[in-house]
Image (cartoon, rainbow, N blue to C red):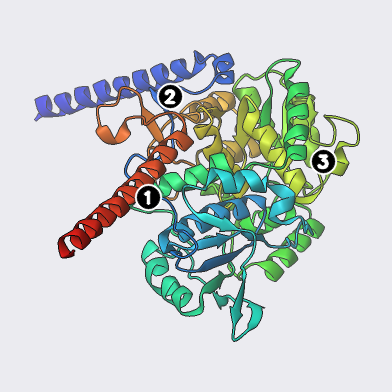
């Protein structure tokens, strides 16, 4: 009996020593992390971006072969619209349809009527996708009974996250009946999880190759990046600490009674009624990080106060008092209004301003999203930076950080920075990793849109570098096959005629 108890005690003692040793070793490894290495790109493990087709990809239909015309109205902000544009191209491909240049909703937040032609390079969009879908500027006029009139598109409200089968049946049936369909609204109207990897690669071709902002936006963004980089590395931070997101998240307890009243009123007017307890929301990682919390994280990771930071954000709720602690820790803060050429603000209003922020964040050495929940800006950027060479992204785990910040607020500060480092250095930093729900395809398109030069699996091998070369070769092969078929039919007809004579 005594021997048995002694054995159990000895086992528990060994277990405790092992756990303590593991913790010390783990903490030591985080202490040894060289933060300067984060200015480099993440480890690719031999992967590189590639969205060229890896199987036969037939050319889009001609005008006579097309099932009809597809119109869509992309609602939401700039990046929600961007995802919708990608989905529209894929939907057109599924339906064998001709895509009408997507319409961008006049955004109620930006009050911006720029539209597709005011934000994106239209000729590039059409040219880049010429082997994927046929794109026209508008639905053409038709002539019937001697009268010319515009073909009217039949309006449909697509179900949210509609499967491929819905487009191949319900939507296609209506298109064939009416000649054109108008899908509105068109935000999150195509499922992200699609079994066909070629359709997923088409999404990447649209997002990372076809969609390029207009020259004046690219020029402004480039000037800002060059100025920031003239003094060395710089990081960009997306501070999602604005009225709409705070009201959506239900994180109101850190604000004054007057501010809480504003947030709750906004929530009631714009979102479904739901009982939200701020502390519970924070503990499950649903609250955006405050500017001060971002500063504390950076300082704990041992970024110093000379770090140059570009802030991408709208108007911060709560005013200067929330920015003051952050600015005290990291005084070298910039945004698109404070850095760049003269009269920059004239070129960065509305959606164009969001586009400039997007490009600067894309090109920064490090990007930090402070809220990647329903933030299309942060999610799209993380995916774009992966595709753009695994550029370092530091994604705070808000759920793991919440108890640490709660302890600090209650005066329990022992080991604070060490605990922060333990959370922050336990991440992939933007390198290739498996996509796990609810991570979006637009946040992580690995492995569909990546390949390996020395891959063991045939599916992961890299096709030729130039997407257009791949598609041009396939298109030429298709034309040659058609020409050969035509020649054979002609020869066969000639031989039959000779026999009959």
Q: Where is residue 99 in the image (x, y as percent from the top left)?
A: 54, 60
Q: Residue at x 68, y 65 (%)?
A: 267
* Alpha-carbon span between mark 3 and mark 2: 40 Å
Does residue 347 appear in the picture of this structure?
yes
Q: Position of residue 414 (x, y in %)?
A: 57, 26
Extreme residue in the front direction: 501
- Give the number of the disc on residue 44: 2
Q: Which of marks 2 and 1 is in front?
A: 1
Comparing 128 with 370, the one in front is 128
Counting other residues with Cα less than 10 Å from the Cα at mark 2, is it few (<14), some (14-19), or many (20 or more)? some
Q: Residue at x 44, y 16 (%)?
A: 29
Residue 28, placed above or below residue 69: above
Q: Quadrant of residue 220?
A: top right
Q: Which of marks 1 and 3 is in front?
A: 1
Extreme residue in the bottom direction: 145
Q: Label 1, on which residue?
A: 58
Extreme residue in the right direction: 343
Q: Where is residue 311 in the image (x, y as percent from the top left)?
A: 73, 35
Q: In which quarter of the image is residue 108?
A: bottom right
Q: Label 3, on which residue?
A: 321
């Amino acid at each position: 009996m005594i021997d048995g108890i002694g054995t159990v005690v000895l086992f528990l003692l060994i277990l405790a020593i092992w756990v303590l040793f593991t913790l010390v070793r783990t903490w030591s490894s985080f202490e040894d992390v060289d933060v300067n290495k984060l200015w480099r790109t993440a480890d690719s493990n031999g992967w590189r971006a590639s969205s060229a087709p890896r199987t036969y990809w037939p050319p889009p239909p001609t005008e006579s072969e097309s099932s009809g015309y597809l119109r869509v109205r992309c609602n939401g902000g700039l990046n929600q619209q961007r995802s919708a544009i990608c989905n529209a191209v894929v939907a057109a491909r599924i339906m064998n349809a001709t895509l009408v240049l997507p319409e961008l909703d006049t955004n109620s937040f930006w009050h911006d009527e720029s539209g597709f032609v005011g934000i994106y390079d239209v000729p590039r969009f059409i040219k880049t996708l010429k082997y994927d879908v046929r794109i026209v500027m508008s639905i053409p006029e038709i002539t019937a009974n001697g009268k010319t009139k515009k073909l009217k598109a039949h309006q449909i409200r697509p179900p949210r996250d509609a499967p491929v089968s819905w487009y191949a049946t319900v939507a296609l049936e209506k298109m064939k009946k009416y000649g054109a369909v108008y899908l509105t609204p068109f935000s999150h109207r195509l499922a992200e999880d699609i079994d066909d990897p070629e359709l997923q690669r088409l999404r990447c071709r649209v997002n990372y190759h076809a969609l390029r902002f207009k020259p004046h936006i690219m020029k402004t963004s480039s000037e800002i990046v060059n100025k920031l980089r003239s003094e060395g590395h710089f990081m960009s931070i997306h501070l999602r600490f604005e009225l709409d997101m705070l009201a959506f998240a239900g994180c109101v307890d850190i604000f004054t009674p007057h501010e809480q009243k504003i947030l709750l009123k906004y929530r009631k007017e714009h979102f479904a009624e739901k009982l939200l307890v701020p502390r519970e929301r924070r503990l499950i990682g649903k609250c955006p990080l405050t500017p001060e919390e971002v500063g504390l994280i950076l300082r704990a990771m041992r970024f110093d106060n000379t770090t140059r930071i570009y802030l991408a954000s709208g108007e911060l709720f709560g005013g200067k008092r929330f920015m003051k602690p952050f600015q005290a820790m990291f005084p070298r803060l910039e945004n698109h209004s404070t850095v760049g050429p003269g009269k920059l603000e004239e070129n960065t209003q509305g959606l164009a301003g969001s586009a400039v922020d997007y490009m600067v964040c894309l090109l920064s050495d490090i990007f930090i999203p402070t809220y990647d929940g329903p933030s299309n800006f942060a999610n799209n950027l993380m995916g774009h930076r992966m595709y753009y060479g695994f550029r370092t992204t530091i994604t705070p785990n808000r759920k793991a950080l919440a108890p640490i910040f709660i302890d600090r607020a209650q005066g329990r500060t022992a080991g604070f920075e060490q605990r922060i480092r333990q959370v922050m250095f336990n991440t992939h930093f933007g390198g290739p990793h498996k996509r796990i729900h609810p991570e979006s395809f637009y946040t992580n398109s690995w492995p569909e849109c990546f390949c390996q030069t020395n891959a063991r699996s045939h599916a992961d091998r890299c096709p030729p570098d130039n997407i257009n070369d791949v598609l041009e070769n396939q298109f030429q092969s298709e034309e040659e096959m058609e020409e050969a078929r035509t020649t054979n039919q002609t020869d066969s007809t000639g031989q039959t005629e000779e026999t009959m004579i």
